[in-house]
Image (cartoon, rainbow, N blue to C red):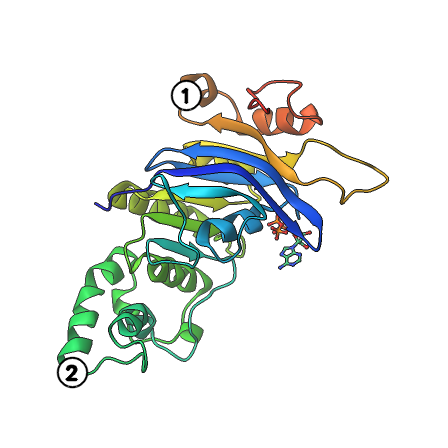
Amino acid sequence: MNASAKLSVQGLSKFYDGMPVLERVNLDVAPGTFCTIVGASGCGKSTFLRMLLSQEHPTRGQILLDGKPLPAEPTPDRGIVFQKYSVFTHLSVAENLVLASEFEAAPLTGKLFGSGKRKALDDIGELLERIGLSAASDRYPAQLSGGMQQRLAIAQALVKKPRILLLDEPFGALDPGIRLDMHELLLSLWNDLGMTVFMVTHDIHEAFKLGTRLLVFDKIRHDPQAPEAYGATITYDLPLNKPSFGDRDPQDIAGAIRAAGTPGQSSPSPINHP
Ligand SMILES: Nc1ncnc2c1ncn2[C@@H]1O[C@H](COP(=O)(O)OP(=O)(O)OP(=O)(O)O)[C@@H](O)[C@H]1O
């Protein structure tokens, strides 16, 4: 099992062109937590994930990984999966998965040969088996179904055994039946590998089903005359494995979140803001 990571977000704000997208985000996440993230379109959920990956950087505040500032660049201990299949179309399934090892071993050419290549292919055998793509290892992405392509994308994110897995609406483009299979796969990978997961979704049922902690992003302050004046923050932070939530219908809780309008006024337990 990988050692998963403790993450601490402190006073984080992100501005684009002087306009706030996220404001004063504070969060402590214990190792191995599965955080699901929901919120209105455009409220900064993907931006938040990109900052956890170090693809973007906070305008203010900081992110600590195991007590140390997050590295300034993406590192192999953080893997990401996007909604659109982010696999290389000119490479086979197996080649997509050995690519990371190739660039690590041969940064200039990105190619391994002979015994080095054979070892890299051996190394990905178990992962291919795990995601159910062993029989398709020589196929190219265009020859795979959408679900298979997304399984490949997940495997690609896992190949370097990350301690943090970032998922940006990973199942948004898949049919409902395929989504259920993907839920099972993701939960079993999370159980086995013990990663800390952050997953953005627009599907509240998915958020409740998969997460051990639900984070709702929204704006606390609204100015109808200047809708861009304020950024979003975490307005609800719900533990999902508490018995008090376990017997409640996700739809009820989702309704309560929507009905709250101004977060902090009604159940379920809003977080306290300074
Ligand atoms: N690189 C960028 N430059 C300027 N503005 C950006 C950039 N990236 C994102 N934004 C803006 O930041 C805001 C938040 O975008 P983001 O994609 O994080 O939202 P989101 O909550 O993930 O949205 P959705 O649910 O629709 O995917 C949007 O207004 C977007 O236009």
Q: Secondary structure at mark 1?
A: loop
Q: Is residue 62 above or below residue 129?
A: above
Q: Mark 2 belongs to which amino acid?
A: Gly
Q: Going from the N terminus, do you reach mark 1 or mark 2 first?
A: 2
Q: How many neighbours does mark 2 have within 10 angstroms: few (below 14), some (14-19), or many (20 or more)?
A: few
User: Residue placed at 82% from the left, 42% from the top?
Assistant: 226
Q: Nearer the viewer, residue 61 or 261?
A: 61
Quadrant where the C terminus lies? top right
With 266 as the anchor, is 108 left or right in this view? Answer: left
Q: Position of residue 54 (x, y in %)?
A: 46, 55
Residue identifier under label 2: 114
Above-or-below relation of 151 to 194: below
Which callout, 1 or 2, points to the residue nearer the camera? 2
- What is the crowding at mark 1: few (fewer than 14 residues within 10 Å), some, or many (at least 20)? few
Q: Quadrant of residue 173?
A: bottom right
Image x and y of residue 148, in percent:
39, 62
In the image, farthest residue toward the left? 115
CA separation in Å, label 1 and label 2: 52 Å
The reply to whether residue 176 is visible in this rendering is no
- The circle drawn on residue 242 is 1
Quarter holding the N terminus is top left
Q: Nearer the viewer, residue 7 or 236?
A: 7
- Under mark 1, the amino acid is Lys
Residue 76: quadrant of the picture: bottom left
SS for dot 2: helix
The picture places residue 128, in percent across and down from the top left corner, at 26, 62
The residue drawn where x is 42% and y is 73% is 88
- Reply above or below: 102 against 11: below
